[in-house]
Image: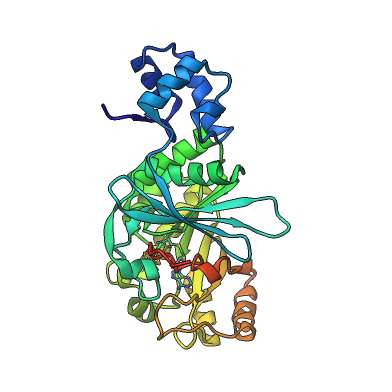
Amino acid sequence: MEKYVLSSKTLKELEDIVIAMDEPKFRAKQLYSWLYTKYASDFDQMTDISKTFREKLKQNALITDIKIKQRQISADKTIKYLLEYTDGNVAECVLMRFDNRPNLTACVSSQIGCPVGCVFCATGKTGFVRNLTSKEIVEQIMIMQRDTGLRISNVVFMGQGEPLLNLDNVLEAINIINDSVGIGIRRMTVSTSGIIPGLKRLKDINFQATVALSLHAPNHEIRQQIMPIEKKYRVEDVIEALKDLVNTTGRRATIEYTIIKGVNDSLSQAKEVLQLLKGLHCNINIIPYNNACNAEFEKPSEEHINKFKFILERSSYKVTVRLERGADIDAACGQLSGKMKNV
Ligand code: SAH
Ligand code: SF4
């Protein structure tokens, strides 16, 4: 018989499992608490559970069926995990700490590979394999909590994959992360390359997490050269859909702008970006291009990025430059390829 997998299950699902194991329903609450608040990684840690039930659990259940295939720790303490799912596919997730802040942010993947194929992104280069299930998404957070013993406070869907092309599972995962893992929806961010039907659906459900749009270009012409999705959903229409969403939810969007030397970084392009965003409630996050096995591209100098930022700030947007985390272990934005590194 296949073993029950307990982690990332809802309380109701755990109740069904303990009942199927001929145990009283209250045992599910005990398991739930060991899994979600004490990050138990072994049944023997569950000391308030009788020895006989623990033995039964060892026989019939697993805490998780997902393996940590590799763990890399960066000089800035970012941890990148390569996880192996039951079908042998792998995906990465990243745990980031920011200095002077107690927050721990988990960057999670929503798909194995990505079908969008942005030219500057290592994930895009790998092609698309499959969607992750809601449990496979939640498990990334559970695994990082179990591995470190630390509570994660924020979640960003900025790992591999396009979350809005796996929206059913992403929304279900967000519910579990909210209800069971205990991370408030406003502490979650979903980043998208701009899938209009997905944005419309988020509007319809009055989605309360932050939505981040990967803009990366000042206009249609440049965007279609680096993001093939622009051929399907034009940037002006994407921004309209985002405005609709923001006006419904009342939640300010984030605009991500990966800045690439000679491609989208001129100061006149900064002005064009402002034109494009007119009327949208948003913060802007500039991401200096990270090397992602594409020799064509380079990041602009820090001085130049600051000039670009200064122009954007003129129209009272809050503009930040994203701190580069984990670049030495290929854990920074755009560097997740799902490949193992020899260490
Ligand atoms: N697929 C979603 C989620 C990925 S989020 C999306 O594209 O929005 C990761 C962010 O890093 C996105 O804004 C993505 O466009 C950006 N990115 C991808 N490759 C990058 C690179 N090489 N350097 C910097 N940012 C990159
Ligand atoms: Fe996919 Fe995002 Fe990478 Fe584009 S940037 S290929 S949408 S993961």
Total number of numbered labels?
Answer: 0
Q: Position of residue 163 (x, y in %)?
A: 38, 54
Instruction: Check the picture and name the quadrant holding the N terminus.
Output: top left
- The answer to whether residue 204 is visible is no
Up-down: is 34 above or below 311? above
Up-down: is 22 above or below 226? above
Q: Position of residue 297 (x, y in %)?
A: 44, 84
Could you tell me which residue is drawn at 44 percent across and 42 percent down?
139
Q: Is residue 339 left or right of residue 41?
A: left
Up-down: is 78 above or below 250? below
Could you tell me which residue is drawn at 56 percent across and 72 percent down?
286
Q: Nearer the viewer, residue 216 or 236?
A: 216
Up-down: is 58 above or below 295? above
Q: Nearer the viewer, residue 237 or 16?
A: 16
Q: Position of residue 146 (x, y in %)?
A: 54, 41
Name the quadrant where ligand 1 sits. bottom left
- The answer to whether residue 62 is visible is yes
Could you tell me which residue is drawn at 45 percent across and 78 percent down?
218
Q: Quadrant of residue 117?
A: bottom left
